[in-house]
Amino acid sequence: RKATKGGETIFSKIIDKVIPADIIHEDEQCIAFRDVNPQAPVHFLVIPRKRIAMLDDVNQDDAQLLGHLLLVAKDVAKKENLVDGYRLVINNGKDGAQSVFHLHIHVMGKRQMGWPPG
Ligand code: 5GP
């Protein structure tokens, strides 16, 4: 793991607006912004403001927050007009191909996805 629980990442800097991002949703618990290296015509990330390195680190106290992240993912997908469907992904740890150790939900749409993923 590249960052310990609560560690500073590039996403902390996006939350703090120290580095810019194309932010498409903000509320008291989370933000959503476009991925800098999009894997689909629409590709954004939903992240908690709380510093949580990865899904492995959440617990019962985070249940409301996790539900909120999913609701925001769905609401922003609707705003982005992803009417034909979309894909949510959470990469967790090395085998999950996680590269930024601040929990995030990928939301991708406007192209046909394949299954199973690579
Ligand atoms: P992971 O592999 O950790 O699930 O995904 C991290 C994602 O964050 C990648 O899709 C990558 O393109 C994106 N990303 C990394 N650094 C930045 C950044 O500085 N700005 C934005 N907007 N996205 C980033």
Image (tube, rainbow, N blue to C red):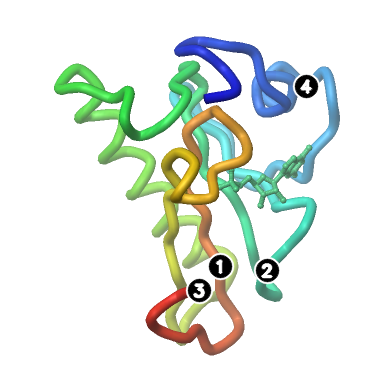
| Numbered disc total | 4
| Mark 4 lies on residue | 17
Mark 4 secondary-structure assignment: loop
- Residue 54 to residue 98: above or below: above
For label 2, the residue is 39
Mark 3 lies on residue: 118
Disc 4 to disc 3: CB gap under 8 Å: no
Residue for point 79% across, 51% down: 36
Q: Is mark 2 within 8 Å of ligand 1?
A: yes
Marks 1 and 2, how far apart at CA:
7 Å
* Residue at (43% x, 80% y) in the render: 85
Mark 2 vs mark 3: give the one in front. Answer: 3
* Image depth: mark 1 or mark 2 in front: 2
Residues at marks 1 and 2 touching, judged by CB atoms closer than 8 Å: yes
Spot occupied by residue 20 in the image (x, y as percentages of width and height): 84, 32
Residue 36 is marked as none
The amino acid sitting under disc 2 is Gln
**Depicted 54 relative to depicted 85: above or below:** above
Neighbor class of circle 1 (other Cα within 10 Å; few <14, some 14-19, many 20+) is: many
Q: Which residue is mark 1?
A: 108
